[in-house]
Image (spheres, rainbow, N blue to C red):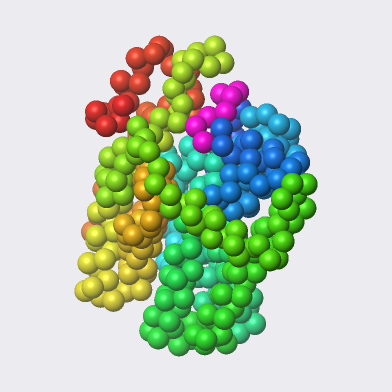
């Protein structure tokens, strides 16, 4: 594997190759199964209603994610391809965004390629890239926002300002998909101050007050713009007067107490893959098929070690890349301890799990000499697990109704 990764000195060809591989993988047999899967039963009908501008529906979430599903239906028809097509683009954007984040942190293409590759095989990105749900779109906008704000750290003052503003717009769009992205606004504001204090040459031409102002204005404007279709509803159209009260109604829907669910799980169990979810398991398209949302054990568990190592390394050396890699996961995960949700589900861990690939790549790059060839053995293990679980990640044809026992290592996985 060292021979394969060694020639990757230039980031652009490596990134393009990774993006092509990701898009091809996400699109392979995308239309299987030819029926709505898991939460598609909520979001595809909502997208149809939005496409027809009939009126408000599924109002516990903002509009943008459903609008993107509706765009897919408009472009490719009201069928499995149309439902899921834009989710594949979101998945590819996540892979590319993680590549960009790590390249900006390390300036090494090998590390960036490892991060992108681990994201591609972490299981969760593959599953979410092949289903019409909101989380993939939200994660794509957040990951691209982090990459863009990192890109803004260097360049001319004009470049820094417009890149920072673009990152803020992307965060606003992420919030326009799901409110779970809101904490990243705060993280961006705090991160700017801390990193600017450590090195005043970062984000040239921006001071904390101007950066915060651009962040709030650009993100807020982008978020509000996502409600534009609602002003044209045939029934109960949105008005400027009820735009704010509508946000309060959304909050009430988000925080309502829900009845217990078979797949509910506590936030603290997600890092150890405590309660993954069967999105689908039944006979379809002539065979027994399943779609299992869980994380690649090598990435999920190895990533926790990488986060700890990066955090400890930062405490000892104050290397920014180590602290940032650890903080991405800690901030993305710990916030779920205080988000007012009556029920938790494993797919809420989707975005924090993506940051594990960043921590792994940074840790491998930082301690590569100490690891010797063990890093390559680890990467091979992650890829092998990906191929082993691939049939139940992508609704492959299984032998029979008891086939799930081959992949459910623990009782809580059934």
Q: Is residue 371 above or below residue 283?
A: below
**Vertical position of residue 206 compared to residue 3: above or below:** below
Q: Position of residue 340 (x, y in %)?
A: 38, 56
Tell me which corner region of the image, top left, top right, bottom left or bottom right, holds residue 338.
bottom left
Magenta residues? 32-40
Q: Residue at x 28, y 56 (%)?
A: 306
Report whether 21 appears left or right of 229: left
Q: Is residue 323 above or below residue 393?
A: below
Q: Residue at x 41, y 36 (%)?
A: 293
Is 34 magenta? The answer is yes
SS assignment for the magenta stretch, majority: loop
User: In the image, what residue occupies the spot 45% across and 71% down?
Assistant: 186
Q: With respect to residue 281, does 135 lie above or below?
A: below
Which sits in the foreground, 373 or 122? 122
Q: Residue at (68%, 29%) from the top-left corner?
A: 79
Q: Nearer the viewer, residue 294 or 381?
A: 294
**Quadrant housing residue 187:** bottom left
On the image, the x and y values in percent for residue 23 come to 59, 41
- The quadrant in which the C terminus is found is top left
Query: In the image, is 386 to the left or to the right of 148?
Result: left
Residue 402: image location, x then y, percent: 34, 14
Q: Is residue 283 magenta?
A: no
């Amino acid at each position: 594997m060292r021979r394969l990764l060694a020639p990757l000195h230039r980031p652009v060809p490596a990134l393009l190759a990774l993006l092509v591989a990701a898009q091809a993988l996400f699109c392979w047999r995308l239309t299987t199964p030819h029926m709505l899967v898991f939460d598609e039963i909520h979001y595809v009908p909502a997208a149809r209603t939005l496409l027809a501008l009939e009126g408000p529906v599924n109002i516990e979430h903002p509009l943008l994610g459903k609008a993107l599903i509706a765009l897919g239906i408009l472009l490719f028809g009201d069928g499995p391809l149309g439902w899921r097509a834009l989710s594949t683009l979101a998945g590819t954007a996540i892979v590319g965004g993680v590549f960009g984040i790590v390249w900006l942190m390390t300036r090494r293409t090998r590390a960036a390629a490892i991060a992108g590759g681990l994201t591609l095989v972490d299981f969760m990105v593959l599953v979410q890239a092949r289903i019409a749900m909101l989380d993939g779109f939200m994660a794509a906008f957040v990951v691209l926002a982090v990459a863009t704000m990192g890109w803004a750290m260097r360049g001319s003052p004009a470049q820094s300002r417009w890149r920072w503003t673009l990152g803020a717009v992307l965060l606003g769009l992420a919030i326009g998909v799901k409110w779970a992205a809101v904490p990243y606004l705060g993280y961006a504001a705090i991160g700017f101050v801390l990193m600017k204090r450590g090195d005043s040459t970062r984000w040239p031409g921006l001071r904390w007050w101007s950066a915060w102002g651009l962040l709030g204005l650009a993100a807020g404007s982008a978020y509000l713009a996502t409600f534009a279709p609602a002003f044209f509803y045939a029934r109960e159209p949105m008005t400027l007067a009820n735009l704010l009260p509508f946000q309060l109604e959304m909050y009430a829907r988000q925080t309502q107490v829900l009845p217990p669910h078979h797949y509910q799980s506590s936030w603290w169990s997600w890092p150890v893959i405590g309660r993954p979810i069967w999105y689908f398991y039944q006979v379809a398209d002539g065979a027994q098929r399943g779609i299992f949302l869980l994380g690649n054990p090598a990435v999920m568990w190895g990533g926790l070690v990488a986060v700890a190592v990066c955090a400890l390394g930062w405490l000892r050396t104050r290397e920014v890349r180590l602290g940032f890699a650890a903080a991405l996961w800690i901030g993305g995960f710990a916030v779920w301890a205080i988000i007012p949700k009556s029920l938790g589900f494993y797919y809420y861990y989707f975005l924090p799990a993506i940051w594990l690939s960043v921590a792994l790549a940074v840790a491998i790059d930082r301690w590569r000499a100490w690891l010797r060839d063990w890093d390559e053995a680890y990467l091979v293990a992650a890829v092998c697990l990906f191929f082993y679980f691939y049939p139940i990640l992508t609704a492959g044809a299984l032998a029979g109704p008891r086939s799930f026992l081959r992949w459910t290592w623990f009782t809580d996985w059934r």
